[in-house]
């Protein structure tokens, strides 16, 4: 059996609830099924507790300042709402975290507008990527373009070790995609079966 995988889940204030729950639940099932390689999900943020947009309060396992980025196989950055504090994802500490995990061979998962800090970090330069396109205030695809990415209008885009998606609707599919990239298709299908999913991810 492969050694345990470690996924770092960064929570900014005002995060989109489902874009976090999909990963804690689906990856959490790897610790329920004995025949599947376990994936540890470590939740981090700037504070001990982080509120979502819809007032779900989550306790972090580790403060961001104490994270050793090289220990993780993947980093997940959820989208969220600017008016609820989500813009802290653009702080230098977060951009540096994205760069470090990626440069050490890790997978970067950018949910919804989570693609924007990834683009600003530089890891999306010359890569195809997508993001949330239903905003009436911001042209998010143009922001990707301005940062050197190649914006495309698709549900999910996988460019090497970077996954971007268009929004909350693809959260479960992206979580399964990450599991497949970490553990392989066999483990992913075992978890899908245990969770009673019958359709295949696209």
Image: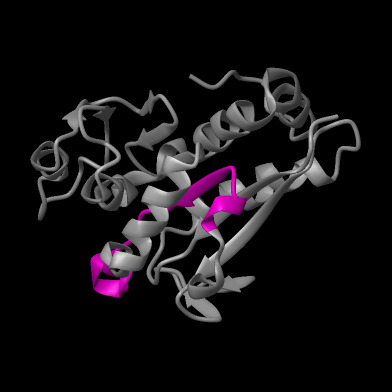
Query: Camera-side residue: 10 or 70?
Result: 70
x, y percent for residue 124: 27, 36
Residue at x-position 63% and y-position 32%: 182
Residue at x-position 39% and y-position 72%: 13
Query: Camera-side residue: 62 or 140?
Result: 62
Q: Quadrant of residue 153?
A: top left
Asked if residue 175 lies left or right of residue 86, the reply is right
x, y percent for residue 8: 56, 54
Query: Camera-side residue: 31 or 75?
Result: 75
- Tell me if residue 11 is in the magenta stretch: no
Asked if residue 65 lies left or right of residue 181, the reply is left
x, y percent for residue 90: 26, 63
Residue lying farthest to the right in this orientation: 34
Residue at x-position 44% and y-position 36%: 170
Query: Camera-side residue: 33 or 104?
Result: 104
Decide if residue 21 is in sight here.
Answer: no
Asked if residue 31 lies left or right of residue 122, the reply is right
- Tell me if residue 72 is in the magenta stretch: yes
Q: Tell me which colouring the rendered structure shows.
A: one colour
Compared to residue 164, the image places residue 64 above or below, namely below
How many discs mark residues in the rendered view?
A: 0
Q: Quadrant of the N terminus?
A: top right
x, y percent for residue 175: 56, 38
Compared to residue 5, the image places residue 12 above or below, namely below
Compared to residue 140, the image places residue 59 above or below, namely below
Decide if residue 74 is in sight here.
Answer: yes
Stretch of the chain drawn in magenta: 69-87
């Amino acid at each position: 059996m492969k050694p345990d995988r470690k996924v770092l889940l960064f929570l900014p204030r005002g995060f989109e609830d489902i874009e976090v729950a999909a990963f804690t639940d689906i990856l959490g099932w790897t610790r329920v099924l004995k025949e599947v390689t376990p994936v540890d999900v470590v939740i981090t943020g700037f504070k001990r507790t982080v509120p979502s947009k819809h007032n779900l309060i989550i306790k972090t396992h580790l403060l961001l300042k104490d994270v050793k980025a090289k220990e993780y196989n993947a980093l997940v950055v959820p989208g969220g709402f600017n008016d609820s504090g989500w813009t802290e994802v653009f702080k230098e500490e977060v951009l540096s975290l994205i760069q470090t995990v990626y440069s050490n061979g890790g997978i970067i998962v950018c949910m919804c507008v989570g693609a924007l800090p990834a683009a600003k970090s530089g890891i999306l330069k010359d890569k195809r990527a997508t993001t949330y396109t239903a905003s009436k205030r911001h042209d998010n695809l143009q922001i990707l373009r301005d940062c050197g990415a190649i914006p495309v209008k698709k549900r999910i885009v996988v460019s090497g070790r970077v996954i971007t998606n268009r929004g909350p609707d693809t959260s479960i599919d992206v979580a399964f995609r990450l599991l497949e990239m970490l553990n392989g298709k066999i483990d992913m299908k075992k978890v899908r079966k245990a969770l009673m999913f019958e359709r295949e991810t696209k």
